[in-house]
Image (cartoon, rainbow, N blue to C red):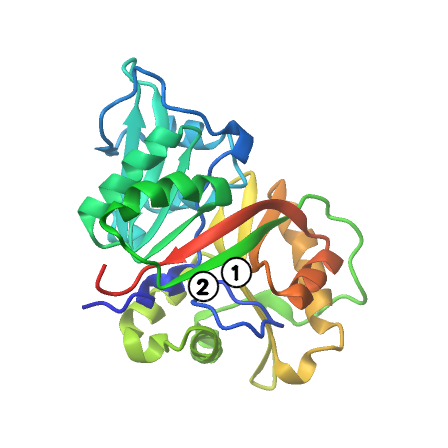
Amino acid sequence: MVRPLEFAFEFVRLNPMSRIPKPALKAFSASPPPSALRPAPPTRAASPQLLLQGQEEETLNFLAAHPVQNVMLSSLIRDNGFECRLNRGNFYACRDAHGELTGVALVGHHTLFASECAETIGEFARQARVQGDVYVIVGERESIKPFWSSYAQGGETPLLTQRELLLERTEAGTAVGEAVRGLRLATLGDLQTVATVHAEMAFAESGFNPLEVNPAGFLSRLTRRMEQGRVWVWIEDGRLIFKTDITGETPEVIYLEGVYVHPDARGKGYGLRCLSRLSRELLSRAKSLCLLVNEANGPAQTFYHRAGFNIHSHYETIYLPPHV
């Protein structure tokens, strides 16, 4: 059986100053602010239906209503389409009696959803329970409530629940300190260096080493990300000083994960300089940047605030035990 966190390295979320053990993940689901959740219309569809090739434009238009929250769903569709093993799950949609979308979800190892309708969210939860291969559920805090209420009807108990903050930066602002001449896109020649550090971070945070659990899958995903130009590094004398990954990208939003600063370089402003300079670069091609941080991790929140990130919304992640 696949271990419950093996998939997580498609979207690893790690902080340079984190001292709080947590499973690595990264993807997040979308829904509107809590006040926007509403009961299902009386004409809603009875159950989710698989999304198929040819429905991409309609789906992306639906997700565009909340581009920050929906960046991972939108990015996966743009990168892979609906029917691709790299999604590690299936895309579903709910519609009303007029055929209009009321929600979109990815159901699988990592489950995320976008809907303004509480009943639609419940339908996605019931689909997830039937599908049976769900290990992590992520969503805005108020949206997780109806999802879990429907999913856990059989008495399931989470392995772990975490509260997180979705942070966003929308202005290029002024870069901090001197330019970082060594900050660049990673190449395949950096694969071993980046993979080793990435695996060490994951093990320290979650207790699972992807190079031991599923080395082929882990290296394949990291290789693809590098080929897409979505891994940034600063390496000197073979030492990885700074790293971060772009794990979701649309024309409107870029989602960052895997922020790392070498232990010997921490507290010297290197991480802040790198993230500030990179943010200016990335904001030339997208309207905003976003990332998730543990709500209890004050030092990391301070770091990101100094880098120009502010709170956008509140999230919750539910990790399920392997037997679910």
The location of residue 110, given as percent across then percent down, is: 34, 53
Q: Give the answer, above or below, for where 291 lies relative to 195.
A: above
The location of residue 123, given as percent across then percent down, is: 28, 34
Helix, strand or loop at label 1? It is strand
Mark 1 near mark 2, Cβ–Cβ under 8 Å?
yes
Viewer-nearest residue: 313 or 105? 313
Which numbered disc, 1 or 2, marks the residue that appears first in the sequence?
Answer: 2
The furthest residue to the top: 98
- Within the image, what quadrant is residue 185 found in? bottom right
Q: Amino acid at mark 2?
A: Val
Q: Amino acid at mark 1?
A: Glu
From where the camera sits, is residue 82 visible?
A: no
Label number found at residue 152: none
Helix, strand or loop at label 2? It is loop
Tell me the distance, in whole angstroms, between the alpha carbons under discs 1 and 2.
6 Å
Label number found at residue 257: 1
The location of residue 204, given as percent across then percent down, is: 47, 79
Q: Residue at x 36, y 23 (%)?
A: 40
Count of residue discs: 2
Viewer-nearest residue: 135 or 265? 135
Q: Give the answer, above or below, for where 245 lies relative to 285.
A: below
User: Pointer 2: what residue?
Assistant: 12
Q: Residue at x 52, y 68 (%)?
A: 186
Quadrant placement of the N terminus: bottom left
Quadrant placement of the C terminus: bottom left
Q: Residue at x 24, y 53 (%)?
A: 85
The location of residue 157, given as percent across then percent down, is: 32, 58
Q: Residues within 10 Å of mark 1 (few under 14, many from 20)?
A: many
From where the camera sits, is residue 140 visible?
A: yes
Q: Give the answer, above or below, for where 125 lies relative to 209.
A: above
Q: Residues within 10 Å of mark 2 (few under 14, many from 20)?
A: many
